[in-house]
Amino acid sequence: MTLKELVDCIEGVVVNGQERLEEKFDGVFISDLLSDVMGHAHEGNVWLTIQTHNNVVAVALLLNLAAIVFTAGNAPDAATIEKGKEEGVVLLATKLSTFEAAGRIYQKLQ
Amino acid sequence: MDRAGMSLEIPVEGNNFSAAGEAASRVKKTLLRLGIDSQLVRRVAIATYEAEMNMVIHSDGGKIILQVDEEEIKVQAVDQGRGISDLELAMKEGYSTAPDEVREMGFGAGMGLPNIKKCADRLEIKSVVNEGTTVVMGFKYQP
C-alpha cells in the first residue's frame, strides 16, 4: 500500500512529504510512548500517534519510519513541521480517531 | 574501511527537549557514512537515543562520545546531575522517576534502560548520586 492510498483511506492531510506519497509502507505501529516506538516499531512502518511535539521527528528518522500520522485532529507543532521538512520525514494528519484510522488501514491491508 | 581510532564527541543539553535526539541522529549518520551495517546502526541509534533522552530528562547535561574501533562500536553517555540512586530499580521495565509533564510528552515510560539493554552487547552503568552518571554501551560487529 502506498502513502497516497493511506492518505485517501484515512481522509488525511499531507503536512509534509507530498513528493514521497508514491512510496510504499510496511505495516503500522501505534503508540504514544516514544520508548515503546523506539523499542518495537519496524523500519518502513507508518506510526499513528497523538504526540505532536518535534521529538517525534527524531524517532521517525532514527527508525526509518515511512510516515507519522497525527490522529484525532491533533495538529503537529510548528517546530515539528519545520523539523520534518528539514529532515525529510513524511507527516500526515487525520481527524479520525486512532481506532478508526487503524481500523480502516487494517481493512485495506487485508 | 579504516575503523580504527574514529571518535566523535557531541554535547547534550539537560532539559532541552527540542534538540533531543540530535546526538543520536549524528551518531547514526556518522556510522552509515562509515559503511557500518544498517541493522547494527539501528541498534546503536536506538540505544544512543535512549541514553540521550535520559540525559535530557534527568541530568544537567553532558556528552555522548562515539568511538569506532576494530573490536566494537562504543558509545558513552556521560552526564552531570543527580545520578541514579537505585540502579537495580532503574533497570526495571516500567519503573520511572520522570515528572508528569515529561510523561505527558510520551517520555519517561520506564523503557529507556531496558531498551538499551536489549540493543547493546555490553552495558556498564556507573552513577554517583548528586554527581552524575556514565553509561557505556558496546556493540559488536558480528551479532
Image (cartoon, rainbow, N blue to C red):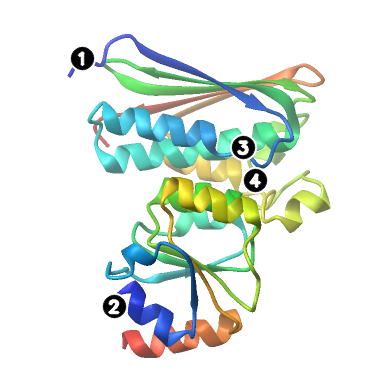
Instruction: Using the numbered discs, state the Cα–Cα distance from disc 1 to disc 2 in whole angstroms.
Output: 41 Å
User: Residue B3's quadrant in the figure?
Assistant: top left
Give the chain of mark 4: B
Return the residue nearer the eye: A79 or B108.
A79
Classify mark 3: residues with Cα within 10 Å, few (<14), some (14-19) or many (20+). Answer: some
Which residue bears the numbered disc 1?
B2
Q: Secondary structure at mark 1?
A: loop
Residue at x 31% of width, y 88% of height: A110
> Label 1 sits on what residue type?
Asp
Kind of residue sitting beneath label 3: Ala
Mark pair 3, 2: CA separation: 33 Å
State the mark number for residue A1: 2
CA distance for labels 4 and 1: 38 Å
Residue A62 in view, yes or no: yes
Tell me the SS state at disc 2.
loop
Foreground tag (1 vs 2): 2
Q: Amino acid at mark 4?
A: Lys
* Residue ID for mark 3: B19
What label sits on residue B79 in the rendered view? none
Q: Earlier in the sequence, mark 1 or mark 3?
A: 1
Identify the residue position indicated by label 4 in the image. Answer: B92
For the residue labelled by badge 4, is the local secondary structure a helix, a strand or a loop? loop
Chain letter of disc 3 in the image:
B
Q: Chain of mark 2?
A: A
Q: Are marks 1 and 3 in contact (CB under 8 Å)?
A: no
**Alpha-carbon distance for marks 4 and 2?**
38 Å
